[in-house]
Amino acid sequence: MIGNVALDVVIGLVFIYLLYSLYATILMEIISSILGLRARNLCYALSRMLMDEDDLGSSGSNFLARLGTTITRFTGKSWNLKNPELYNKFFSQPSIKYLSSGGLGHRPSYLSAENFSKALIDSIKVDRVEVGELLKIQLGLRIWAITKEEEPTAGPEQLVIAGQIKKLLDQRNPDLVQFRTLLEQWYSGIPMDLEFDIALPSEQSDTIRQIESMLHDANNDLVKFKILLENWYNDTMERASGWFKQTTQAILILIGAGLAVGFDVDTIKIMKKLSKDTEAREQLVQMAIDFNARNEGLIQKMNNGKDTLRVENQLNTRLDSLSSIKQTLEADIQSARSMVVTPPSDDSSIFGYLLTILALSLGAPFWFDLLNKLVKLRTSSAAPARSGGEAGSIDSDVSNRNIINRVG
């Protein structure tokens, strides 16, 4: 087989990286599915939206809290958030509660913007008052702090008013005028019309103030208000996708470290082996070419499989698909390892392992795309060489016949 030695070594090394990257990605997806990491990431994103950030005072404490949140983000919780009442009420809504499977991952892993806006509005508004939908939302925003289970900033008189408002909410048809009177007393005698068009106090929840601001931007139009809520959710989900990638990247690095050491995937040793062993190099290159031709849609198949995680009852199907691909890869890895195995006496280098870990962290799509380009480059460079060889053979035959004719 005619080929450039350096190119063949690179193809062999890239093929090794691809096999182990695919294996690491599949292991990461299985771990993610079993532990419900997508659901945890969604919960974390929603907690950032619906809870308030706690000011811990010193910059050192804030730094430690943010560092702890970054490390434990995969749990779906944050160390520096407070006021979870709206967050808890949001997840108690039927439209959210029944999206989950009720299993290990008891929270949904996917939520549409429409479901978010509906559940949030249902969490805020006061249903028992016989007024329009918009007034129910406005009223709910203003009594939110009053109806919290604990209000540490409230004085004795305000606690009495809060108790009266809670009793009023328990009635079947609360009186709107009485509501207005109690709210005026709560907000230090500020007159309030039936539209409750007053600013929220500065000590109010940041989240409630954010929602109130969007309601004001919508000019008290319910349809526009829902659109603004959905835009807010979509913007947060874009950032949440980045958070999830950071989490999975960290998991990939840990898995890559385990594979590099456990399977003795030392980049430097593999390069030396492929550079010296012609037979191993040619066999590995042929394996890479066959694998590339046989698995053109593998990456696309794995990416499409990720979308099925939006539907939690397809979790078992997803795991079965990944397990099937994993078994096939294990056979390919075993074959590839047999070609680049080195004697046990050959010392492994930490630097070689680090190079492997770094390479695996780049992900399978990167190495699959690179392998595809290298195989095409090798094929295109080999074709002119074969054409030139055939042309030279024809010219030689013609010349030989001419010599024979002259001699004869």
Image (cartoon, rainbow, N blue to C red):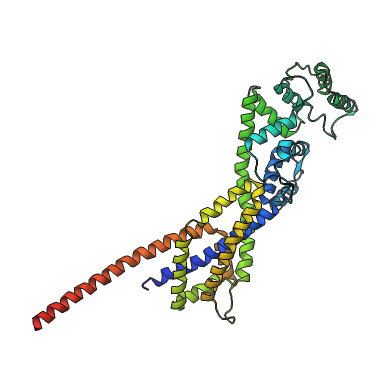
Q: Residue at x 44, y 62 (%)?
A: 293
Q: Residue at x 63, y 70 (%)?
A: 262
Between 176 and 332, the one lying in front of the other is: 332
Quadrant for the N terminus in the image: bottom left
| 257 relative to 43, above or below | below
Q: Tell me, yes or no, if residue 326 can be seen here.
A: yes
x, y percentage for residue 49? 69, 38
* Quadrant of the image occupied by residue 162: top right
Between 267 and 106, the one lying in front of the other is: 106
x, y percentage for residue 77? 73, 47
| 369 relative to 189, above or below | below
Q: Residue at x 16, y 76 (%)?
A: 399
* Quadrant of the image occupied by residue 344: bottom right
x, y percentage for residue 328? 56, 65
Left or right placement of residue 143 versus residue 73 in this view: right
Q: Tell me, yes or no, if residue 188 can be seen here.
A: no
Between 95 and 392, the one lying in front of the other is: 95
* Numbered label tally: 0
x, y percentage for residue 235? 60, 38
Quadrant for the C terminus in the image: bottom left
| 315 relative to 133, above or below | below
* Quadrant of the image occupied by residue 237: top right
Left or right placement of residue 288 versus residue 52 in this view: left
